[in-house]
Image (cartoon, rainbow, N blue to C red):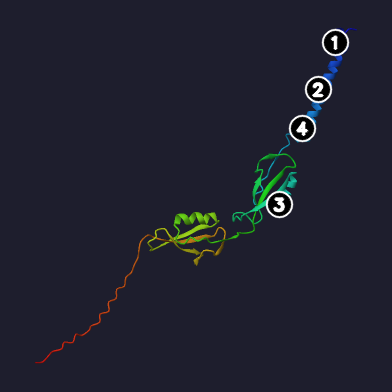
């Protein structure tokens, strides 16, 4: 049988049909296997871990077949419990696959201490950014008579005077005493008048 007749024969066409069918079935099975192994379409919504302890995080993620990695602790935040989750990645509500790791950062146990900067004779506009850069906050502002307008004359913490280098906890409020730009001088003029009698010598003639 010639090649041309063979290519147009029913036997050859049947073999081609069978081969195409086998390839189609294998492709279908492969796609379903790939979907199964990658959990395609079976996504998990990441829970909100905010303010949970590490033990609570582990328990909650285990129930969802997720894992976690503790990255680090952050500076103490008073609006979060000690050792609770402050940050997480992925964020709550994100869709992930089973076994995905959720990265967390937890709150420190308390405020760390910082040294009070030297703000004496600095202006108010210079003092406030310096405080904030160290994690401190601006407290009550008081003005007293002084030629230096808005110049820091004293620093106070909880009602007591403090000096540069003293240690306070982060987020502490530092009260500032500023000059009002007006001079207040009280001059007490005391004139002691000492009467010195003048003796006149009279020459009696």
Report the front residue among 19 and 183.
Answer: 183
Query: Of helix, strand and loop, which one carries label 1?
Result: helix
Q: Within 10 Å of the Cα at label 3, are there few (<14), some (14-19), or many (20+) other Cα atoms?
A: some
Q: CA distance from mark 3 to mark 1?
A: 70 Å
Report the front residue among 27 and 164.
Answer: 164
**Looking at the picture, does residue 22 appear above or below residue 7?**
below
Residue at the location (77% across, 32% down)?
35
Which residue is label 2 attached to? 24
The N terminus: image quadrant? top right
Query: Of helix, strand and loop, which one carries label 4?
Result: helix
Which residue is label 3 attached to? 56
The earlier-in-sequence mark between 3 and 1 is 1
Which residue is label 1 attached to? 7
Query: Of helix, strand and loop, which one carries label 3?
Result: helix
The earlier-in-sequence mark between 2 and 4 is 2
**Looking at the picture, does residue 36 appear above or below residue 118?**
above
Residue at the location (80% across, 25% down)?
27
């Amino acid at each position: 049988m010639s090649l041309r007749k063979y290519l147009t024969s029913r036997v050859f066409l049947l073999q081609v049909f069978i081969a195409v069918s086998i390839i189609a079935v294998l492709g279908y099975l492969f796609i379903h296997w790939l979907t199964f192994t990658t959990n395609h379409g079976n996504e998990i919504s990441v829970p909100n871990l905010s303010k949970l302890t590490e033990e609570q995080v582990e328990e909650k993620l285990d129930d969802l077949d997720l894992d976690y990695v503790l990255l680090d602790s952050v500076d103490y935040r008073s609006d979060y419990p000690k050792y609770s989750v402050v940050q997480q990645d992925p964020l709550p509500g994100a869709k992930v696959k089973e076994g995905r790791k959720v990265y967390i950062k937890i709150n420190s146990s308390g405020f760390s201490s910082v040294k009070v900067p030297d703000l004496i004779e600095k202006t108010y506009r210079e003092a406030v950014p310096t405080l904030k850069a160290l994690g401190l906050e601006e407290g009550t502002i008081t003005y007293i008579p002084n030629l230096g307008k808005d110049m820091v004359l004293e620093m106070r913490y909880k009602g007591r005077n403090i000096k540069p280098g003293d240690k306070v906890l982060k987020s502490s409020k530092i009260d500032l005493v500023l000059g009002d730009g007006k001079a207040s001088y009280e001059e007490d003029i005391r004139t002691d008048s000492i009467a010195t009698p003048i003796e006149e010598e009279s020459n009696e003639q």
